[in-house]
Amino acid sequence: MMNSLARGDNTFPVEITHISSHGVWLLTGQEELFMSYQDFPWFKNQPVNAIIEVEEVSRGHFHWSKIDVDLTVEMIKHPEKFPLVATKHKQQPYEESP
C-alpha cells in the first residue's frame, strides 16, 4: 500500500498501514501515527484508493490529493490544538471520473 509519488526531491516515502472502522494508521519514516475518524472526519467515508494516495510533501507535512486534505505530524499528534474546519462543510466522498 505504499505510495511514494515522484513529484520532486522533497517527496519522502509514506504509507497507510491500516484502515479500520475506527480510523487510519499512517507510517512515516520516523513513526506510525493513528488518525481516528472522530478527530479526522475527512477520511471516514472515503474509498480506500483516496486514503492510500498520500504524499509527504515536506518533512512532517502530508497531502491527500484526491480528498484535498493537508495535515502535519503536529496536527495528527495533537488534534485538540486544531479546530476541525471540516465540520463547517461536509466532505464529499472522492469519486473516480469515468
Image (cartoon, rainbow, N blue to C red):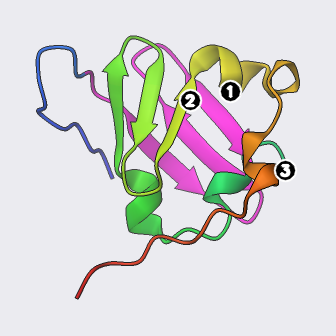
Above or below: residue 27 compared with residue 48: above
**Circle 3 sits on which residue?**
38
In the rendering, at what x and y percent does residue 86 appear? 73, 49
**In the image as oriented, which residue stretches furthest toward the right?**
80
Crowding at dot 1, Cα within 10 Å, few <14 / some 14-19 / many 20+, comes out as: some
Decide which of 70, 26 is in the foreground and name it: 70
Q: Residue at x 79, y 19 (%)?
A: 78
In the rendering, at what x and y percent does residue 96 appear? 32, 78
Q: Residue at x 53, y 19 (%)?
A: 31
Who comes first in sequence, dot 1 or dot 3?
Answer: 3
Who comes first in sequence, dot 2 or dot 1?
Answer: 2
Above or below: residue 71 compared with residue 53: above
**Circle 2 sits on which residue?**
71
Gap between marks 1 and 3 measured at Cα = 12 Å
Decide which of 49, 82 is in the foreground and name it: 82
**Circle 1 sits on which residue?**
76
Decide which of 83, 7 is in the foreground and name it: 83
Q: Residue at x 72, y 64 (%)?
A: 90
Please say if the residues under marks 1 and 3 sit with CB atoms less than 8 Å apart: no
Residue 74 within the segment the image draws in magenta: no
As shown in the figure, which amino acid type bears the numbered disc 3? Gln
As shown in the figure, which amino acid type bears the numbered disc 1? Ile
Who comes first in sequence, dot 2 or dot 3?
Answer: 3
